[in-house]
Image: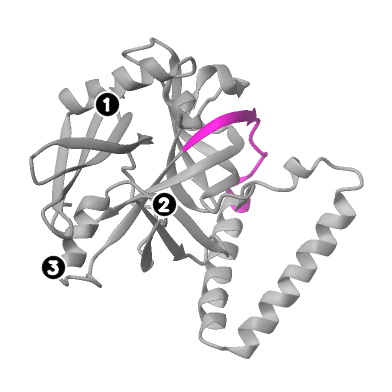
Amino acid sequence: MHKFMRAIGFSKLNRKETQRLVTDVIVDAGVRSYTSLDGDNVIACFSKEVAPGIGLTVVGEFDEDDQFSYDYYFPFVEATNVSTEEDVNIERHIATESYAGVFEDPRMGISVIFYLQNMIPYIKAMRNDELPMQGVTLSLSALALDGTILMPLKKTAKDIVNNHQATKSREKLVLAARLGDEDAIENLTLNDMDTYTTIAQKIQKEDVFTLVDTYFMPYGAECDQYSILGEILEVQSVTNSITHEELYHMSLLCNDMIMKVCINKEDVFGEPAIGRRFKGNIWLQGKINFPMSS
């Protein structure tokens, strides 16, 4: 069973209950999407919300006799804000008819890999030879199994402006470095060395979370799981309509990028509030906003 089902309020499902839930999603889906694969088979995705913007997707195939057999399911939290406009590359997973996306954004500083939520529009665009497509954006979301709420750092208006300018300056250097600018590469190296030296000196007397405001870095062996620290922009307490478990549905600003995060209330240490920070390990998902469906 999918371990991130707990994040959307299914913390005590057994195998029989999972089968009933999958059947319920297929029969009573709020969103249905289809496309043909090679031959006569049709791949289908059935999605049903269990709370606003949070739910379960079941994926399977219809054969030539119009009989449906499900292959797998995954929990999701709907991504709404545009997170990045960078180019996204999509690759199919080996084991299942599912897809992973990867992009590089100067705000992150690393190649970011995510699980693609809306694969049907992507498959259609690929089959119609419409890729690459102009005007495509990406919205990110995530599910978490554990989290800690931290108090915000004390920042003046001047600090916020200086941080924003420093972020923009670093983005320009990263973009220039990608194009082979040796001066930009040297400046980035020197800046990283200065940052390391400063933190190494201060960490002797200060806690690391008073020095680091936000971060985004790989976590564990799975390529689409990350450890994050981000500022809470919005937070809602919602309830799973089936199990009645309470969830936190948050909007986070992490490395200057906005994403939605959902977590079971039982798995959070602390009380989320706007302005505070969320630290946890996430499974990153993404939705490509194709112009034809936006």
**Residue flagged by tag 3: what amino acid is it?**
Asn
Judge whether residue 238 can be spotted in this image.
no
Please determine whether, in this image, residue 118 is positioned above or below residue 39.
Answer: above
Please determine whether, in this image, residue 16 is positioned above or below residue 220.
Answer: above
Front-lying residue, 94 or 8: 94
Disc 3 from disc 2: Cα separation: 24 Å
State the mark number for residue 203: none
Point 46% across, 32% down: residue: 2
Disc 2 from disc 1: Cα separation: 26 Å
Point 67% across, 39% down: residue: 154
Q: Position of residue 271 (x, y in %)?
A: 58, 20
Secondary structure at numbered mark 3: loop
**Residue flagged by tag 2: what amino acid is it?**
Ala
Q: What stretch is highlighted in magenta?
A: 143-159
Residue denoted by label 1: 49
Q: Farthest residue to the right: give it.
A: 204
- Which is nearer the N-term, disc 3 or disc 2? 2
Q: Is residue 70 left or right of residue 95?
A: left
